[in-house]
Amino acid sequence: MKIPFNKPFLTGKEAHYIYEAVYKENKISGNGKFTKLVHSFFEQNYSFRKTLLTTSGTDALEMSALLLDIKPGDQVIMPSFTFVSTANAFILRGAYIHFADSRADQPNIDETSIEELINEKTKAIVPVHYAGIAVDMDKIMDIAKRHNLYVVEDAAQAIDSFYKGRPLGSIGDLGAFSFHETKNIISGEGGLLAVNNPDFVHRAEIIWEKGTNRAAFFRGEVDKYGWVDIGSSYLPSEIIAAFLFAQLEHLQEIQSKRKALWQRYYDNLKVLENKGIIHLPIIPEYATNNAHMFYILTESLDIRTKLIEHLKSKGIHAVFHYLPLHLSPYYRDKHDGRPLPNAVRYSETLLRLPMYYELTFDEVDYICEQIKNFFL
Ligand SMILES: *Cc1c(COP(=O)(O)O)cnc(C)c1O
């Protein structure tokens, strides 16, 4: 048996919509019919004030840093246990990052560790909804409000997931999503910026369109368009949008299959948790699970290394995740030296198991069987 970690799922309609975009609409560049369909899908289903399709989740984060007008010397707070793009987007504007630790019970940012990192240079907090599980956003928004800070949700993994009934990505000033082929809904590379703060709506579209008011021109709102602000080329071609729309039409079906697989893992491995051998993910009662990822936590790095080897010998590809950013070659000299023990622990003991739409229940059972054989 050979079970990869991830396998991109195609709904079957992707090529059909791409054909339509290219040959029928005759529109291959961005912001055409399919981009608009994608925008309305997200605005209608998740109550985002405005959405802009981007070429990646990374670009949606970079747009966020531009919108917040991050300047050299500004400070931003985010978890150390995250993807490099969360940090790079702000580093590119000259920000200094204060990395916060993860919670003891799950990898999301420890909300109680944020306030001590705030000073007069702090501009924003960037919570990351790890594995699509909500950060405790009431706490984040309360801190942000009291200190007059912006909140950018890194919701790259968090499509169709909720905090106390509110869609992730809709709570902060801005939210960034990713459709990279490792995410639940994909377009190869791709992302989306959700703009919730009304102050950013107008400028977001300009930054998206190379610093021009081209989008407003095509809506007939201005009679000529020109260079009005800084910006870049963040909008993807209609080929990407068409592909993505085919995926979104099957969102609920994809989500329910992933959730069923997730539950199968959980029920199967519960016995190991009951025996105190591993820890399983914790879903707080304020959060939903979008089954972006199924992970287990081992007791040590050594055990995890041996387990990865064992699973590999059985044809199963299981992978660890982030190396903490505060210890990375690029940042360790810039970090202020605070130890972030939980981030280090997740980096050393978290193991992600195969998770994709076409994974079968039998395969999940087989994987769990091999994990049990290793421990018992
Ligand atoms: C995937 C991911 C990103 C980056 O998204 P891309 O579309 O690959 O640029 C950013 N942050 C997190 C937490 C991610 O998982």
Image (cartoon, rainbow, N blue to C red):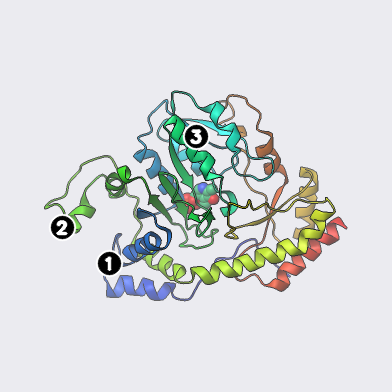
Classed neighbour count for the residue bearing mark 2: other residues with Cα under 10 Å, few (<14), some (14–19), many (≥20): few
Mark 1 or mark 3: name the one nearer the start of the chain: 1
> Please, what secondary structure does the residue beneath circle 3 have?
helix
Which residue is painted at 51% across and 69% down in the image?
252
Asked if the residue at tag 2 contacts the one at tag 3, i.e. Cβ–Cβ closer than 8 Å, the answer is: no
Report the label total: 3
Q: Position of residue 244 (x, y in %)?
A: 43, 65
The structure residue drawn at horizontal position 43% and vertical position 52%, both measured from the top left corner, is 56
Q: Secondary structure at mark 1?
A: loop
Residue that protrudes farthest toward the left in the picture = 223
Mark toward the start of the polypeptide (2 vs 1): 1
What amino acid does circle 2 point to?
Gly
Q: Amino acid at mark 3?
A: Ile
Q: CA distance from mark 1 to mark 3?
A: 45 Å
Query: Comparing marks 1 and 3, which lies closer to the viewer?
Result: 3
Q: Residue at x 32, y 63 (%)?
A: 36
Against 122, residue 325 (above or below) is below
Where's residue 223, x and y in %? 11, 53
Q: Which residue is mark 3?
A: 143
The numbered disc on residue 220 is 2
Q: CA distance from mark 2 to mark 1?
A: 19 Å
Q: Residue at x 72, y 73 (%)?
A: 362
Residue highlighted by disc 1 = 27
Residue 105 lies left or right of residue 38; in this view the side is: right
Give the residue type that dot 1 points to: Lys
* Label 2, ligand 1: CB separation under 8 Å: no
Of the pair 270 and 98, the residue shown nearer to us: 270
The CA span between labels 3 and 2 is 41 Å
Task: Note whether 336 is above or below 284 in the view shown.
Answer: above
